[in-house]
Image (tube, rainbow, N blue to C red):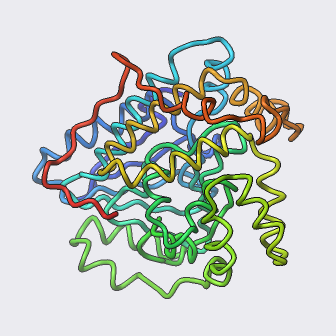
Amino acid sequence: MSGEDSVLLHTEGHAGRLTLNRPRALNALDHSMVRRIDRALTAWERDPAVRTVVLTGAGERGLCAGGDIRSIHEDARTGGSASADFWRDEYGLNARIARYPKPYVAVMDGIVMGGGVGISAHGSVRVVTERSTVAMPETGIGFVPDVGGTYLLALAPGELGTHLALTGARIGAGDALLCGLADHFVPSHLLPALVADLAREAVPAVLPRYVHEPPKGELAGHREWIDHCYAADTVEEIIDRLLGSGVPAAKDAASALLTKSPTALKVTLAALRGAPGLGPLERVLEQEYRVSCAALTTPDLVEGIRAQVIDKDREPRWSPATLVEVGDDDVARFFTPLGDRELSLPAESQQEVPW
């Protein structure tokens, strides 16, 4: 499928419509799709007839399940540079969406994971439904939350973002709203009418007619143990606290962590804790680019994708295999500057940073 076929573009009334169109691949993003979206945003930013941008996904399974993992696996396995080139443009697009001067309405219906979060949760109007499943599941494939995920999760209340980043847990609409990954709940059967009205009227006039009370989430009832356990300074201590809490859900979280890449867990915690000190989204994306490029050279990324996506045996053999074997120097390597390969994104000088 060509880039033109995989992202459908058209204008309807005063709305520019972006439709991710790879439903059989859960609308997974590839490089051509990122470029096509960016070109469309450039054109619509300059077009006075376009007042609103609306992002949707083809099919009923999800907006976007993330990046093209199989391509990343092949690139990492062969030592290529295509993934680094893709991330450079993808992270630039994430930053652009966050700063877009016109309303950017992301319809986060169905599965929204990884790169799907990056093209939706940075938007100015983020809509979830009863079918929404949102997650940053990177540690399960030996990777680290990217696309501004460490920025978004660091802003979540208490230690909810730490819990989601390390475990890769999937959350529904209520918890996405609680964690600041979405703004409004709209029942899925109302989406066609919502999108149609956005082509005719301004966003503030349309939303009140469609926004409903969201279903109750689960995380609010677990804040006590989540905030206590994940406030620890190391992944090892987090797991110890989870196991010692006496709460079944906390024990389940510990069990989940013990299946993830030990290296990815430690790097994720460091990236998340360091994000607030970096300032605006662009600086965090630049850090994530260093981390992602480093991950591309590690055995865990290849092995994690093999186990979860290629062979699907769900039995990754991590290297190192245990948390105690991952030292501070191993973690620090992921944050080493890239020299002339650095990602450098402009940031508005007067931008308010919400830390």
Name the quarter where the C terminus is drawn.
Answer: bottom left
Of residue 28 and residue 330, the one placed in the foreground of this image is 330
Of residue 233 and residue 161, the one placed in the foreground of this image is 233
Of residue 227 and residue 34, the one placed in the foreground of this image is 227
Name the quarter where the N terminus is drawn.
Answer: top right
Name the residue located 79 percent from the left edge and 61 percent from the top edge. Answer: 240
Position above or below: 186 against 326:
below
Q: Would residue 23 appear left or right of 154 to someone viewing this image?
A: right
**Number of marks:** 0
Location of residue 175 (image quadrant): bottom right
Outermost residue to the bottom: 213
Q: Pinpoint residue 151: horizontal percent, then vertical percent.
A: 43, 53
Of residue 109 and residue 338, the one placed in the foreground of this image is 338
Q: Pinpoint residue 136: horizontal percent, then vertical percent.
A: 60, 52
Q: Residue 156: in sight, yes or no?
A: yes
Q: Pinpoint residue 296: horizontal percent, then vertical percent.
A: 59, 24
Position above or below: 192 against 219:
above
Location of residue 132 (image quadrant): bottom right
Name the residue located 55 percent from the left edge and 62 percent from the top edge. Answer: 161
Q: Would residue 125 appear left or right of 78 to someone viewing this image?
A: left
Q: Residue 13: in sight, yes or no?
A: no
Position above or below: 267 against 210:
above
Name the residue located 41 percent from the left edge and 65 percent from the top edge. Answer: 126
Position above or below: 203 against 43:
below
Q: Pinpoint residue 343: horizontal percent, then vertical percent.
A: 35, 28
